[in-house]
Amino acid sequence: MRFTFASAELAARDGETLAAALVRNGVRGGFTSLYRGRPRGVYTAGEEEPNALVQIGSETMVRATLVEVTDGLVAEPVAGKGRLERRTTPTRFDAMNAHCDVLVVGGGASGRAAAARASGRVIWLDGRRSDPDLTLPRTWAVGIYDDNYVLAVERGRRVWRIRAQHVILATGAIERPTVFEDNDRPGVMLAGAASAYGHPEGVVAVSGGWSPRVHLWSQARGGLRWDDRIGAPVPSGDLRGVECVGSLTGEGLPDAAPFAIPDGDEEIMFVDLERDATVADVRRSVGAGLRSLEHIKRFTTIGTGSEQGKLANVLALRVAAELLGVHPGELGSTTFRPPYLPVSFALLAGRHRGELFDPVRVTPIHPWHVDRGAVFENVAQWKRPRYYPEENETMESAVLRECAAAREGVAMMDATTLGKIDVQGPDAVEFLNRIYTNAYDSLAVGMCRYGVMCKNDGMVFDDGVVMRVGEHRFVCTTTTGNAAAVLAWMEEWLQTEWPELRVRLTSVTEQWSTVAVVGPGARGHLAQLTEIALDSDAFPFMAIREGEVAGIPARVCRVSFSGELAFELNVDGRQALALWQAVYGAGPITPYGTETMHVLRAEKGYPIIGQDTDGTVTPHDLGLGWIVSKKKPDFVGKRSFARTDTARGDRRHLVGLLPAELVAEGAQIVARPGEHRMLGHVTSSYRSAALGRPFALALVQRGRERIGETVVAGGVAAEIVAPVLFDLEGARRDGVGV
Amino acid sequence: MLLIPCPWCGERDEIEFSYGGEAGVPYPSDPAELSDEAWARFLFVRANPRGAFHERWVHTHGCRRWFDLTRDTVTHEIHVRER
Ligand SMILES: [Zn+2]
């Protein structure tokens, strides 16, 4: 097999690691240290390697000791610091979940014995070994979390998430370096590595003893105690469901030789090779008064490289103890954190990237929107048409055209993404009375009502329309992004505070689709498709009618989020596309998207919860005091309206703004140019076709008292006006002569 | 990641659950009777002990039911579970 290292072509044997092949080829140096640029060579034969880091393809900081040579492999040395590729890695990563009775970490003699002894479902893994009897060969356990949740990485390509009843750690011990002048020279390597590489010529083998690999035990919050015999910390105490065996416990490890810092130049006695940190650095840190290993680590950066102190930490402890003249056990230990080995973010992300990063929700009408060339926006996980550009149209001109159609003719929108909760039961009215700020006793069957809900602190949480479709049955709509949260909120009250209420809640967001037909021409347009009487006497505002539209059973509501005459057609989702096509085909009609919807509602001063509110806004702040019941003895949030802070006079109110030019949403509002004290901020900002000018909604301190005043919003002069900017009398909702 | 015993479904990974804070803080029987201070205490003040903590969880991505348990905030050991 041939491979290339630093432009030199070399030969490798089957199954050989890159480090082994380099050493066998007589390469003693080949690497450079990060800060001091000193020549370095392969130092270990394992995952603790501090020097031999390479770039292979798009992967950087790969340890030459861990990568098996394949024919044609090209590796370039990396001087201690890799560079992230700007392009997405083409490598495919994956993940597996597994459960077992016993997880054995480590393939050495004691791990093998533990695996043989274990019963039930056993997973036995090891990162270095590829023995065929391992359950997961070449798999590193890199992290252990609560309740024995273990993260393991198989061949750098697949993550295993393992939940184990019992974990047996047989992670063994790691050979320690020792300090002397020029101990970093190429050719100096740990005795175990020299032996693994077959004692090649020109290699100086060193050993400072052996330290148990306590990392996983310590991650699991196991205690440590200093063992004088081996000169290193060992696991101490008990941990529920975790057991240590073999040399990890110190058992069988050789006695440590007495430790002493030799005479000589401490600036070239290296403690952490990857960090270029020396005995002199440790001496400076203790000279600065540092006494704990945690502090010495931060001062010297020892143990903070990608090797994470596997070699350096215990050595640093011994050096510091000697310099301070104390017992090493008195200096404590550093905290071991996952991962045991560097793990790439791409590997952790696995398949959850690109299209699979987050689920995409689309309505049954989505294919039509795509065919029509809609520009989409993400609203929570939904794809919603933002606008439907005609040829060569910008968003601005498309939105002005769509708005004009809704105000002057007839337009239609896919409103399917609104959350819908079916509320059923004999106590449904009582339940809604407690959840919403207004009352539902008086809502007749076949009618609907706008509702706002608050949290206990009195701040607006969500809003929507509540339809009474039966004596004991309601359908509540929610904002698109809050559907799951509202259902969870309602469930919480039902289960934890009001278990006596006989009410059942069901999400029906996916089952129903909604098509809004909007504009002065809506009645005439719809009349072609249905027998339902649509005139205002027969079908008043906020009424619900059941019937067929284009032969499809529909629940039709006369609600309006634009101020115009509007009918919302609710049908079985499976028939929504057919309905949409029938409505579209019944005569000239303009489809519109969320951007137009936002402009139309803002012209009417209707807030969008989550855009014009931020969790610090009460219904009164929004000017919705009329929807807060004074008669109901209690409802969620009521008591908070009387709190001093909620009732104070200088709160921010939702107002309209007429700025000289379009202002940015989020722009700060101040009283005068040059003033810094913030009066509030712009929450919504658009160009209006109906007003022929830009306008905005804003939360402004004492806003309702400032109507008529001019303030500065994002550097632009703006007049404060009432939030309702269009059709102030509300005359248009029953339709105007067309 | 905790392994949480749902009283209805059995042990499941923490990611299936949502946290509900301290248990045993009932909604006051008559909020209107409370002083601002007492109401604020109900709204905002919760215990934060080192050791055993009685807390609420909901099995959001499972049976959607609420339950209480006692968790040691130091060891994360879950001692009791109650419906
Ligand atoms: Zn459950």
Image: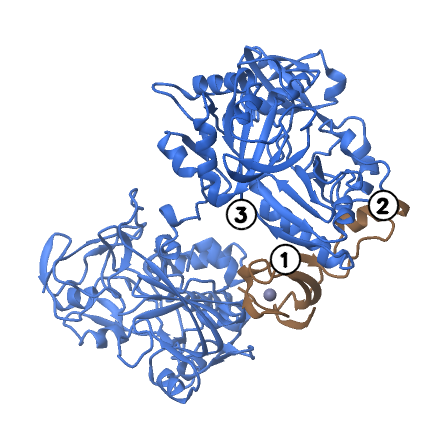
What residue is shown with label 3?
Answer: A511
Inspect this view and state whether residue A250 appears.
Answer: yes
Task: Look at the numbered disc 3 and say if its residue's Cβ is closer than 8 Å to ligand 1.
Answer: no
Tag 3 subunit: A
- Looking at the image, is A638 positioned above or below residue A497? above
Q: CA distance from mark 3 to mark 1?
A: 29 Å
Identify the residue at the far right of this view.
B33
* Callout 2: SS: helix
Return the residue nearer the eye: A36 or B57. B57
Quarter-of-image position of residue A446: top right
Which chain does blue denote in the image?
A
Q: Which residue is mark 1?
A: B19
**Residue A427 in picture, x, y percent from top left:** 77, 52
* Disc 2 from disc 1: Cα separation: 26 Å
Report if residue A675 is visible in the image: no
Q: Chain of mark 2?
A: B
Q: Which residue is mark 2?
A: B37
The residue lying toward the viewer, choosing from A6 and A267, is: A6
Query: Label 3 amino acid?
Result: Gln
Q: Is residue A567 left or right of residue B31?
A: left
Q: Is the residue at mark 3 from the same chain as the one at mark 1? A: no
- From the viewer's perspective, is the residue at label 2 or at label 1 nearer? 1
Residues under labels 3 and 2: Cα distance? 45 Å
Q: Colour of chain B?
A: brown
Residue A362 found in image quarter: top left
